[in-house]
Image (cartoon, grey):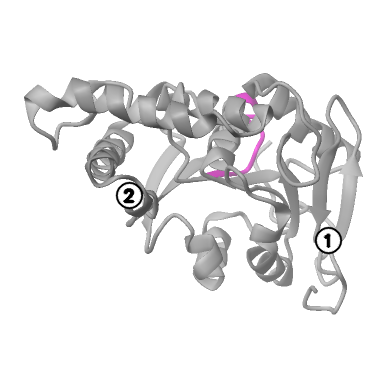
Amino acid sequence: MTDLGLAPADLLVPGDVALGVRDHGRHPRLDDGGWSGDILLVPGARGTADEWDAVAALLRGLGYRPVVVEPRGHGRSGTGAWTWPAVLADLEAVADTLELDRPAVVGRGLGGAVATFWAVAHPECPLAVSIDGYGNPTGPEQLAALPDDDRADHVVRFSAFLAASLQDLPETLSQALRAVEELDVLALYRAVRCPTVVLLSTESDLAEVLPTDLGLVWLAYLDWVHAALRAIDAPQLSVLTIPGSNDAYLSNPENLAGTLADLLPAPAATLPA
């Protein structure tokens, strides 16, 4: 329920793939004029619209209109080949159908990568926020915290472990996770064309569920990711940390909603042309 006692509207937006959408609506106290406060929220891999309920309710109470999009292969959305252009077209179809005005885009993990691709394609976007939106280790140079003679082998074994874990997943989700693994993370973030913020969690829940040796590989990779993203010289890009693990938006929605409200333009703000 929203702060007004109204249930969010669950919709199916038709298109190349039918998309599950949860529209939390806009608080009626928002004055007309200026930016609408529209925000597209994108869950992480395997996620559904439910994940964003607490944060969306808080954002709506601040005057924003949060709209959660379940990517193809997730939740109530249909399946279809996962390519980044196709997924961007899905979000654009939702924005067009709901008549959203220059929506900000916020995503976590897989959704964070989607938000960043949006930032590359939509310079008019007031803000894109990627929460832990990065790929996986693909080269020994990304594992500087580990001994030199083991790095290449660690990358091979990490990739093999991920490949095995994808075998029993539905095809669209498997394609999505492969696409994330193949990301050139630094090139993607260098290419953003609108204000973009990367929120990096200070902890990682993935390291706790991996085999011990691969958990150490993951933590070494995260050290590289944090340093490499901060070293990018891109005027539209900012890199911040958020306390907690990768599910901080679930476990501490008040903190995340407050962080997003600090970063986002206020509803009804005048945006640059």
The residue depicted at 72 percent of the width and 72 percent of the height is 61
**Residue bearing the label numbered 2:** 207
Task: Give amino acid for label 2.
Answer: Ala
Point out the stretch of residues depicted in magenta.
121-129
**Whole-Å distance between the Cαs marked 2 and 1?**
37 Å
The residue depicted at 82 percent of the width and 39 percent of the height is 19
Q: Specify whether 170 is left or right of 142.
A: right
Q: Does label 2 or label 1 sit earlier along the sequence? A: 1
> Which element carries disc 1, helix, strand or loop?
loop
**Image quadrant containing the N terminus:** bottom right
The residue depicted at 79 percent of the width and 40 percent of the height is 77
Asked where in the image residue 86 lies, by quadrant, the reply is top right
Is 65 drawn above or below residue 230 in the view shown? below
> Which element carries disc 2, helix, strand or loop?
helix
Pick whichever, 7 or 138, lies toward us.
Answer: 138
Across the whole image, how many numbered discs are drawn on residues? Answer: 2
**Residue bearing the label numbered 1:** 25
Residue 241 rendering spot, x and y as whole percentages: 36, 54
Asked where in the image residue 25 lies, by quadrant, the reply is bottom right
Residue 105 rendering spot, x and y as whole percentages: 64, 44
Q: Specify whether 70 is left or right of 8.
A: left
Task: Give amino acid for label 1.
Answer: Gly
Residue 2 rendering spot, x and y as whole percentages: 79, 73
**Image quadrant containing the C terminus:** top right
Q: Tag 2: Cα neighbours inside 10 Å, few (<14), some, or many (≥20)?
A: some
Please tell me whether the stretch drawn in magenta is mainly helix, strand or loop: loop
Does the CB distance between marks 2 and 1 fall below 8 Å?
no
Residue 186 rendering spot, x and y as whole percentages: 38, 26
